[in-house]
Image (spheres, rainbow, N blue to C red):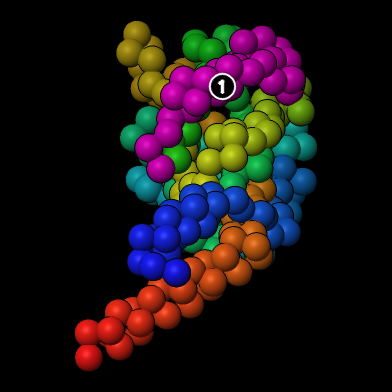
Amino acid sequence: MNFKKVAGFVGLVAGSVVALSTAPAQAFNFASGNLSGCTTGGTTCTTNDGFTIQANGGTLEAKTVNGVTGVGVGAQSVIAEINAGESLDLLLPGGSGILKSLDLGFMYQPPVFSDEVFERATVIADGLTGFLTVLSDTTARWEVASLGINQILTAVSPSTPNGGGLYSILNPFANTVVSSVRLQPYVYENVAPDFRNSDFSLMGAQAEQAVPEPATLAGLGIVAGLLAASRRRKANAAS
């Protein structure tokens, strides 16, 4: 096989590298009351399944409202929620993966808990930006414009005085592989950046680590062998 043929074969197999499978899912669920290895007080924690959570602008704090538990930041007017000027970073196990679900809570609408806005969460993942916006007692909109995602979600726990304002976003960024997620509130400019504006907490997440298909790895091994053989033949011809 000459070098041109080998190069063509390399291109063919390399194109199959995008064929990925997924390892078993890893997940945590604060909403049930299990803090999964994370406790209140520090700025970083690691869940039992390997997610790392980092607080920016304060320390990690947890609280339970109407039977729903979440983790936020403990420096601003609404303790244990992510307020204006604060954020949480969620690092996926293994360095990267496909985010299969993201659970956010304590998201309400006027006038629940003195809110003056339909609370909105900003979710940023490796350059992709999504927004979760409360619409009613039991619905919220999840949208990622760059991926064409626009979904209406039904509350797991309603956005009412007796609810936890909990929403679970399934496949929030489709099958895009990401390494981390930043959570921060969308701050409405016409309302003071305090308890009356957007704030929320992290309740849970699930991720699957993307790995190359075995056939792809085998193909790459064949390519490596062909390239090595081609180089040897060229070296022998030159000597």
Vertical placement of 131 versus 112: above or below?
Answer: below
Q: Is residue 74 visible?
A: no
Vertical placement of 169 versus 135: above or below?
Answer: below
Q: Secondary structure at mark 1?
A: strand
**Left or right placement of residue 91 versus residue 162 in this view:** left
**Left or right placement of residue 166 versus residue 218 in this view:** right
Q: Which residue is mark 1?
A: 149
Residue at position x 30%, y 79% in the image: 234
How many numbered discs sit on the rendered protein? Answer: 1
In the rendering, at what x and y percent does residue 130 appear? Answer: 48, 27
Residue at position x 46%, y 20% in the image: 145
In the rendering, at what x and y percent does residue 18 appear? Answer: 53, 49
Q: Residue furthest left?
A: 238
**Left or right placement of residue 52 versus residue 239 in this view:** right
Vertical placement of 221 versus 128: above or below?
Answer: below
Vertical placement of 84 versus 228: above or below?
Answer: above
In the rendering, at what x and y percent does residue 184 appear? Answer: 43, 34
Given residues 60 and 8, the one toward you in this image is: 8
Residue at position x 49%, y 53% in the image: 12
Q: Amino acid at mark 1?
A: Ile
Residue at position x 73%, y 23% in the image: 155
Location of the C terminus (image quadrant):
bottom left
Q: Which residues are magenta?
A: 126-155
Given residues 10 and 42, the one toward you in this image is: 10
Q: Is residue 25 visible?
A: yes
Location of the N terminus (image quadrant):
bottom left
Instruction: Please tell me whether residue 186 belongs to the stretch shown in magenta.
Output: no
